[in-house]
Amino acid sequence: MKFIFVLRGDIEGLPPVMSSMIGLRKLDKKVILICGKCSLPSQRQFSKLGIEVICPSHSHKLEHSLGPVSKFFRWAFFNRFAWKSIKLIKKIDDIIWIASADTCISLGFQLRNQKYLLQLNEMYAEKPVYRFILRGFLKSAKLIICPDLFRSSILKVWYKLDSFPYV
């Protein structure tokens, strides 16, 4: 069994996700990271730890565009890139670890047919559309992870979850 971490953005912006990957490697689990951006020094460090990184080489070109149209194209590009990568490497007993709500939404409803863990780092209190879209994803996730007990309690109430997300 391997853990396939998926993050639409820059892995260096989410140290808790990096810690989770390193912790799983210390438990001798196979870890693969599919991300939108990862610096070469970080890629080398992950490689030394035995973490494979799959990252599009030209994602930086899409980052500098502004506006909702370019955001749609960035999401669509990552969706296609991530699913293509997942299909190439995922076996039946592997677990997909979704590293952010943004990533979850960008992967689309196809994710609901997978065995996945969802790590929510932000609350999105000011983005009711995100909260509405996330509701179904939280219900279909095998496990929900968040950074602290307060967020865990809030998520349980907001999304009417059967149990508290893991901290």
Image (cartoon, helix red, strand yellow):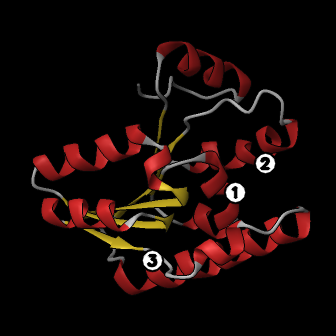
Compared to residue 165, the image places residue 22 above or below, namely below
Q: Disc number at residue 43?
A: none
Tally the numbered discs: 3
Give the class, few, some or many, for how many residues have Cα within 10 Å of label 2's Cα (few <14, many ≥20): some
Give the class, few, some or many, for how many residues have Cα within 10 Å of label 1's Cα (few <14, many ≥20): some
The image quadrant that residue 96 belongs to is: bottom left
Name the residue rendered at 78%, 75% in the picture. 73
The x and y percentages for residue 86 are 45, 77
- Residue wearing tag 2: 133
Q: Earlier in the sequence, mark 2 or mark 1?
A: 1
Compared to residue 100, the image places residue 4 above or below, namely below
Cβ–Cβ under 8 Å for marks 2 and 1:
yes
Mark 2 or 1: the one toward you: 1
The x and y percentages for residue 108 are 69, 65
Q: Secondary structure at mark 1?
A: helix
Q: Amino acid at mark 1?
A: Ile
Position of residue 62 in the picture relative to residue 36 (left or right) = right
The x and y percentages for residue 162 are 57, 27
Q: Amino acid at mark 2?
A: Ile
* Distance of label 2 from label 1 (alpha carbons): 7 Å
Position of residue 128 in the picture relative to residue 59 (left or right) = right
Q: Amino acid at mark 3?
A: Ile
| Closer to us: 34 or 66 | 66
- Residue wearing tag 1: 105
- Residue wearing tag 3: 86
Q: Which quadrant does the C terminus fall into?
A: top left
| Closer to us: 20 or 163 | 20
* Distance of label 2 from label 3 (alpha carbons): 22 Å
Q: Earlier in the sequence, mark 1 or mark 3?
A: 3
Name the residue rendered at 89%, 70% in the picture. 69
